[in-house]
Image (cartoon, helix red, strand yellow):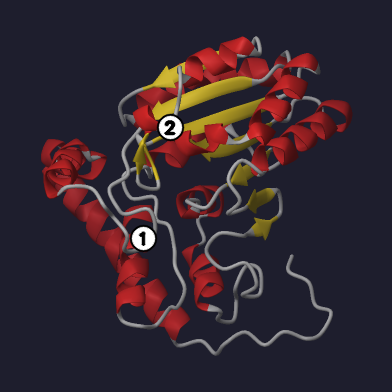
Amino acid sequence: MTRHFELTLLRLFESGLIGGTTHTCLGQEHVPVALRPLIDDADHVFSNHRGHGHYLARFGDPHSLLAEIMGREGAVCHGIGGSQHLRRDRFLSTGVQGQNVPVAAGAALALKRREPGQLALVHIGDGSWGEGAIYEALNMASLWRLPLVLVVENNGIAQSTPTAEHLAGSITGRAHAFGIDHISVRGTDVTAIRKRLRQPMMRVRTHPRPLVIEFETIRLGPHSKGDDTRDAAVLRALKEQDWYARYERAYPEQFAAADRRQRDLAERCAREVTARPLVRRNEGENPR
């Protein structure tokens, strides 16, 4: 669903039906899909500026998300948050890089004290590791043995700067500096990923301590909706690594049927939400 939601969103921008900007997760959709069965509704999930896939995996509700981005009735935050700033139940996203990690650490502390067995999971990119707030949060999470899972979506580029040019050392080394375990995940086989992560994440619940999971992934699209500075040859190479193309080749019949259903769902969602009236907020009304 996420692939076609993001592509539909870009088409709506191109048609002038949405203003502002957005940051898609094209190429990274498998990360929240793989993690979804490993978390439950009582866990806190914190997302970032590239978080549409995180929301869709959590709630399976494209209509409320698209309505939020378009400022239409039924918007999850009454059209206030837009693409990046969403709150629903125990899900929160922010466009401020790294800000979600100390907030997630606070939620993890509350869960440890009041709801043992639950965890807080926070998504960040490789570019966020230049933010000092992350290290303060990791220090406290390790000292206080918090049930915090830090999911790093390392797509090899921070806006327009390759990771090798902005990150000294490694994410592994930075996690270990705080005495925090690190798991590196390659590939896009969601079944294999779940099998590998199930026990480590269960240990975070039963014997609280933070965990860093680093997904080596790719960013197919631009940083935001139209500012890609990479060479065409680089983009062609990334498309060859894309999970979407590989699954299409490996399972042609199954993939075609499933893909058609999700594409139709995204198109119906766009038609329905576009036809809705704009949000009208009463003074003093707060998003849920």
Which residue is at 55% across, 48% downward? 48
Which residue is at 14% across, 39% downward? 237
Element at label 1: helix
Element at label 2: loop
Which residue is at 74% across, 65% downward? 288
The answer to whether 248 is drawn above or below residue 198 in the figure is below
Ranked by sequence position, the earlier of labels 2 and 1 is 1
Residue 227 or residue 109, whichever sits in front: 227
Residue 14 screen position, x and y as percent: 30, 76
Residue 136 screen position, x and y as percent: 72, 28
Q: Residues within 10 Å of mark 2 (few under 14, many from 20)?
A: some
Which residue is at 71% across, 54% downward? 89
Task: Check if mark 2's residue and mark 1's residue have beta carbons within 8 Å.
Answer: no
Horizontally, residue 214 falls left or right of residue 93, namely: left
Identified by mark 1, the residue type is Glu
Residue on which disc 2 sits: 166
Identified by mark 2, the residue type is His
Residue 280 screen position, x and y as percent: 67, 88
Residue on which disc 1 sits: 6
